Image (cartoon, coloured by chain):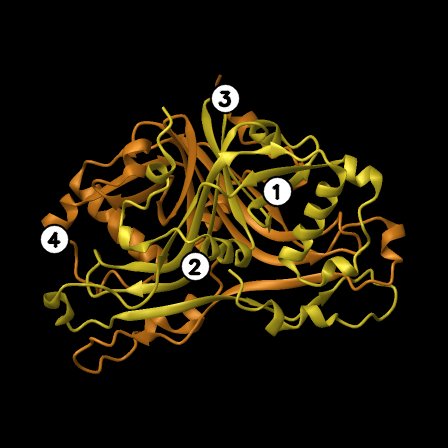
Chain colours: A orange, B yellow
Amino acid sequence: MQTPVHDRLRVRRHPERGVYDPAAIAAILDEAYLCHVGFVSGGQPMVLPTIHARIGQNLYLHGAAANAMFAACAGQPVCLEATILDGLVLARSVYDHSMNYRSVVVVGTAEDVTDPDEKRLALERLVEHVVPGRSAEAREPSEAELRATRVLRLCLAEASAKVRQGPPAESEADRQLPVWAGVVPLRLVPGEPEPDPTMASAIPVPAYLAAQRLAGRG
Amino acid sequence: MQTPVHDRLRVRRHPERGVYDPAAIAAILDEAYLCHVGFVSGGQPMVLPTIHARIGQNLYLHGAAANAMFAACAGQPVCLEATILDGLVLARSVYDHSMNYRSVVVVGTAEDVTDPDEKRLALERLVEHVVPGRSAEAREPSEAELRATRVLRLCLAEASAKVRQGPPAESEADRQLPVWAGVVPLRLVPGEPEPDPTMASAIPVPAYLAAQRLAGRG
């Protein structure tokens, strides 16, 4: 049974955390490095991590042409979820502990991308999604590499976000307990780039890898 | 159709990345803050993020008693996936770009935990999973809070991990290209704890929140 969009992606637990603004949803997807794709394979729900890129109202995924996940996803209902963890929320009570996060859930039918131009653009955006600036420098895919790669498209028409931010929420009684409460912020931080030992000559680290340009990604 | 364990969780894409050692799988699950639970709701695969805790060969999840995900999961086949992102792998070719990561996939049937002692222990371990040391200090769940909380158990009998580490892998021809290649390590770093503004008196930040104790978690 299919339930209407507004019902199957409506945030029911903590409805005040539900976010339905397409721009806010896009911003979370653009910041998240990874997503988690849910599909059904022989009656068994499966979830695998992968990367995504957004072009307007479409998300793109890529994998090997023989990828088993893609074989199970193409033309089928799938779910894509991405979550950025922003902090640990420590309440005085075990019950009110939480996390600060920004998550997105998208449902829809994954479609094979067969147009060569759309496929090339999607692969470029997948690189740019992870490291903005990289695609201008890296060697473009060959025809053989394009044939070996499968690209799927998932429309963002059905998507919602859930966001928790801020200090712990708990009862006045619990607030009187002599227990430290607050938030430990968490951030995914890039370290010093480690050059490939096989690099023949000394090539300087590109400016687009500067820590401040990569920082703040979840 | 159910496929045998060794087939449905065998790592087929890059089989050299497959890890089947239960201790290695447990270590990844223990380090990951979040997991991503896949289930089927009305024929639609869904994925939602949550936290987990491991006690031996069992994983525990918790949620509100009326949680819709749990209603769809209890007694049903589910999939739990957790991924720690360790770095961005920049090859000279777009095609060979990758990520360093450690991921785990578990499939099985989610079972309701009805034994009160097992339920209490699971809730304690969920807090300890996120912040070791916290459960000794935070107020324990009341009977009403326990009734309002549902706990599910998922056995780790069917699980596999996939791990990629190290520099980019590419052809000798591509290695001659004048493009920087290497790895940008990524690490989830805790910031300075932010005290809850409603804290009545000055309570020192607990030792278990020291950055070095929380660091290195994915």
The picture places residue A184, in percent across and down from the top left corner, at 65, 64
For the residue labelled by badge 4, is the local secondary structure a helix, a strand or a loop? loop
* Labels 4 and 2 share a subunit: no
Q: Are marks 4 and 2 in contact (CB under 8 Å)?
A: no
Mark with earlier residue (3, 2): 3
Residue drawn at (20%, 76%) of the image: A199
* Labels 3 and 2 share a subunit: yes
Which residue is identified by label 1? B61
The picture places residue A121, in percent across and down from the top left corner, at 24, 48
Badge nearest the viewer, 4 or 2: 2
Chain at numbered mark 2: B
Residue A176 appears anywhere in the view? yes
Q: Which mark is residue A142?
A: 4
Residue A159 appears anywhere in the view? no
- Please identify the quarter of the rendering in which residue A33 is found: bottom left
Badge nearest the viewer, 1 or 4: 1
| Type of amino acid at the residue the image marks with label 1 | Leu
Q: What is the distance, in whole Å, between disc 4 and disc 2 at their CAs?
A: 28 Å
| Type of amino acid at the residue the image marks with label 3 | Gly
Chain at numbered mark 1: B
Residue drawn at (17%, 81%) of the image: A201
Relative to B87, is A175 on the left or the right? right
Q: Which mark is residue B42?
A: 3
